[in-house]
Image (spheres, helix red, strand yellow):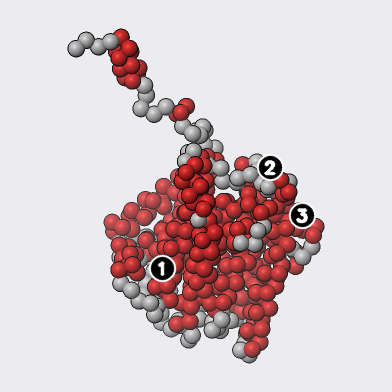
Amino acid sequence: MAQTAAEQASMDSNEERPWLNLNELPFRLTRPPLPVVFLALLALMAVAIFIARLLTGWELVTNLNNNYGWGVWKGFNTLVGIALGASGFTTAFAVYMFGKEQYRPLARMAILVGVLGYLSSVMSLLIDLGHPERIVFPVIYWAPESPLFEVAWCVMLYLTVLLFEFSPAVFERFGLKRAEHLVHSFVMPLVIGGTVLSTLHQSSLGSLFLNVPDQLNKLWYTPLLPLFFFLSAVYVGPAVVIVVATFCQRVFNRKLDNLLPSLAQALPFLLGFYLFVKVAELVGAREFDLLFNGSRDSYLFLAETSMGVIIPMILLMFKAVRENASWRFIAALMVVFGLMMNRVDVSIIAWARPADALSYVPHPLEIVFTVGLWAGLALVFYVAATYLPMFGQAPRNSGAE
């Protein structure tokens, strides 16, 4: 049959139509700045190390041994990533449960930081496990009496909850209104479930170390270690939000500064409560004198407590510090670094081992993978903040735009 002129014109038009028209995307692609390219290169190095580990085993990329099963990948990436991910549940809980609507522009950002923190732990476990494929074993083989079993399940479920909580930003960008409204209708159960799951596994991570009372230094070992892990995750949440929001103000030109002083105001109370309970526990256990015995562990404990708790707590008591962007950022960054030191001390450094035990110095590729992993997570954050409506709209009474 002869084709009509209209049909022929339509076919010609379709043949000339490009497979991907960048002008029709729901966002405009831009040339990435040089720092973003650098992050991408670091992330590619981490991917290469990950592939090499899967193909060749541990020997090429790590110095872990039978005496040091917990190295940089678990002690830093996993424990620190999960703790920093607490920014998601603390901010979402404040917004949706306590009705702190002025912080809503920070909620999606905090939830994304939570997602990335938990992804760091998952990726680190995949490269760290002797048999990476066995990461699914907690789903197949149940051991309810094990704290690690509870941690595995809570992390899996909480990461799923975080992804659901962040999904409205994706649906909004691509105009999927029905899906967006559907998730919004479940936001309260998601927040409640996420808070419960985060509380469980943050404390259960501390429970893991109750199995080593004769190896972990007494300054850190205590039956209250699950409580301290949870409390530290709670106080580091607002600090992480302040640090990330300050970067977002500079990089993405977002007006979030007016929200941060009131958020910083809560930190001295959270830090003070943690410090009070910690000191009371040391006094009650008659171990307070260990702080001043001149050992390496006493210096480490004083360093993490001073830098991560006492000094920022004192600084943030002053209104002038809370309202000054630079000083507020420094104080919050000190809290984050103090938390990092605590997790590394507990999981790697503050252990008593036999004199003839094998030593552990992180392999250079362990460090490179860690840097590349966090660079990749920062890259994901940059892409999300650039192309997704991550900061939302501030309520009128907040004064933000």
Query: Could you tell me residue 173's position as x and y percent?
Result: 51, 40
Residue under label 1, please give it.
152
Q: Secondary structure at mark 2?
A: loop
- Looking at the image, residue 395 sits to the left or right of residue 58; the answer is right
Given the image, on which type of amino acid does mark 3 rest? Answer: Glu
Q: Residue at x 44, y 67 (%)?
A: 154
Q: Earlier in the sequence, mark 3 or mark 1?
A: 1
Residue farthest left in this picture: 1
Residue under label 3, please give it.
323
Look at the image and tell me in which quarter the C terminus lies: top right
Place residue 275 in its image quadrant: bottom right
Residue under label 2, please give it.
401
- Looking at the image, residue 170 sits to the left or right of residue 307; the answer is left
Q: Residue at x 51, y 53 (%)?
A: 185
Neighbourhood count class around disc 2 (C-alpha, 10 Å): few under 14, some 14–19, many 20 upward: few
Query: Could you tell me residue 141's position as x and y percent?
Result: 30, 72
The reply to whether residue 144 is visible in this rendering is yes
Q: Secondary structure at mark 1?
A: helix
- Estimate the spatial distance between the alpha carbons at disc 1 and disc 2, rounded to whole Å: 40 Å
Q: Residue at x 36, y 55 (%)?
A: 50
- Looking at the image, residue 327 sits to the left or right of residue 117; the answer is right
Q: Earlier in the sequence, mark 2 or mark 3?
A: 3
- Estimate the spatial distance between the alpha carbons at disc 2 and disc 3, rounded to whole Å: 19 Å
